[in-house]
Amino acid sequence: MSRHHQQLATALDALDRAFASEKPFPVTGCTYCYGDEGLAELSGPLDLISDDLLCAVAAEVPSHWDDFPRLYRRLTPRIIRSAVTGRLHVDENLVASRLVAAEWTTWDAPLAGALHDIWAAWWRATLHSRPGPVSVRQTLSLITVATGALRPWLDIWTATRTDAADAQLAHFIDDVLVEYEITELHMGFYDEYDASAELLNWLLTEVRDRADDARLDEPYLLSHLRPGTDAMPETDEG
């Protein structure tokens, strides 16, 4: 196991420990969709909740539960571990949107801090994988929407000059350039984060020399650069 993947495993274990303080509670909500048996299972030990039920709750709309933030908070360690390892079978964009709805940044400091550590460790592990269990685009989307910021993760990618990071960059570019989706690229299940301008300018100015893809030179894309930026950064000739 590489150093970065070991750090991710350590962060996941720390997440489990931080959320161990979230004890079972009587879960109430939509009995039509889940029934008394499902609600009873959700009210019991975390490790006895079935994977199918976990996936259903991870994707469910908040209005199905009488106390959605508390329920999602309690399930977070299992949801995140399954998402990171590619075993959740729920759209990563939806997980991000649900975490935002649960207002995870307002949770007690040990809980929110453990999640912050996951985002950083997961992103670095992703950039050192070719490929990982979750696509680089989906990983970037989840952590961007969850944190409300794209730039910090792009900065880490810029600074990670490895063959694996460049291979992930090639995969990402090939993904977002299909029908020039990059010019109208939103992240989150509800398209809550408009990533178009940030991503396009980053691709055309900061990592263009690492991307062997002639499509990035298309006039159509260059025309979408922010005013005052160039397709390639100027070099210091003096």
Image (spheres, grey):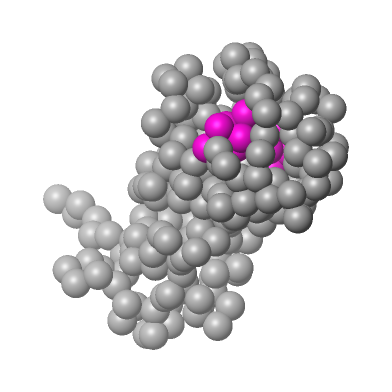
Q: Residue at x 84, y 27 (%)?
A: 48
Whether 151 is drawn above or below 212: the answer is above
Q: Would residue 138 be counted in the magenta stretch?
A: no
Q: Is residue 62 left or right of residue 229?
A: right
| Residue 192 visible in this rendered orientation of the protein | yes
Magenta span: predominant SS is: helix
| Residue 142 visible in this rendered orientation of the protein | no
Whether 4 is drawn above or below 17: the answer is below
Rendered location of residue 201, percent (x, y): 34, 64
The quarter in which the N terminus is drawn is: top right
Rendered location of residue 103, percent (x, y): 44, 39
Q: Is residue 52 left or right of residue 170?
A: right
The quadrant holding residue 8 is: top right
Q: Residue at x 14, y 50 (%)?
A: 238
Work out whether residue 177 or residue 184 is closer to the camera in this orientation and state it: 184
The magenta-colored residue range is 69-83
Rendered location of residue 41, percent (x, y): 81, 33
Q: Residue at x 48, y 17 (%)?
A: 110
Work out whether residue 96 or residue 34 is closer to the camera in this orientation and state it: 34
